[in-house]
Amino acid sequence: MVINITTAHGRWAGAVLLVGLVACGGQDATMLSSTTGAPAPAGPELGASADVTAEPPPSSVPAAPEVVQSEHVKTEREPDGSFASEVNATDMQSWVYFSLQSQQEVTPDEPGPSPRWDLGFRRSNVKVNSGTSGAGSVMVAVASGPFESLTRAPTEGYISDAADADMDGSPDYAFAAGEGWYSYDPATHVLTARDTVFVVKTPGGDFKLQFSSYYDVAGTPGMPQFRWAKLGGA
């Protein structure tokens, strides 16, 4: 929008250019650009009222990025609007934390009480921010039907991470309940992602999620990959 103001001291042109929100699947980046023009020659009348003229927006607006990559997480936007993420969770000790709402890796100073993350990854372990893993309210349920046709979250069946009831030395993670998100072959020691579709309920909305692999293209383990998308309201 261009604002031309004529005063008793002359005519000034102030250009306020694009204040745009560029969406990255739920994450917004705000850009602000402003310039102030030099005094223009005085108009024929002094003390005239402001002349406000609107210009059409620029013809080219930067497109939302198709790939967001941080230190441990790479996320790509799929043609259907969903996302595909790969997490480098190869470290045996450290967790990688991810926010579905902001679509990015987060690094909370104290993960336990922090509300910033939804999912945590370490090797094949996937934890949620609730129960024994965090003070959040993130919960997981198994959905019925294929990923593509799921449009609404189930109303029941949600669980949080729980204490180690089976005494295997690890908490009972919600993503490991039942058959869990992967199958394990003791002969080959290979993990294979099941085609189970999960729904993750977070304070920022409900998301469908399906794991596709535990290995990257080079065969490196500890690189879980999954596709996911936000679900509509009830």
Image (cartoon, grey):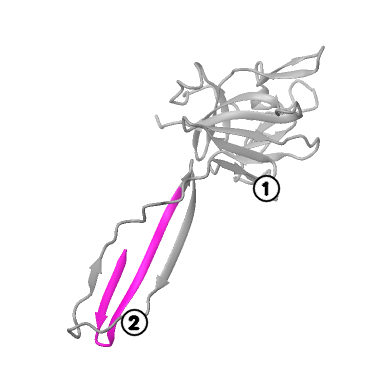
**In the image, is 16 to the left or to the right of 89?**
left
Residue tagged 2: 39
Q: Which mark is residue 107?
A: 1
| Disc 2 packing (10 Å; few <14; some 14–19; many ≥20) | few
Compared to 41, does 29 lie above or below?
Answer: above
Instruction: Name the dominant secondary structure of the magenta segment.
Output: strand
In the image: residue 125, left or right of residue 104: right
Identity of the amino acid at label 1? Thr
Query: The magenta stretch spans which residues?
Result: 1-22
* Local crowd size for mark 1, using a 10 Å CA cut-off: few (<14), some (14–19), many (≥20): few
Q: Is residue 153 magenta?
A: no
CA distance separating discs 2 and 1? 49 Å
What amino acid is found at the position of numbered circle 2 in the picture? Pro
Image position, residue 72 (x, y; %): 69, 41
Residue, x 43% and y 52% (percent of image)? Answer: 21
Image location (x, y in percent) of residue 97? 66, 41
Identified at 54% across, 44% down, the residue is 102
Residue located 18% across and 80% down the image: 48
Q: Secondary structure at mark 2?
A: loop
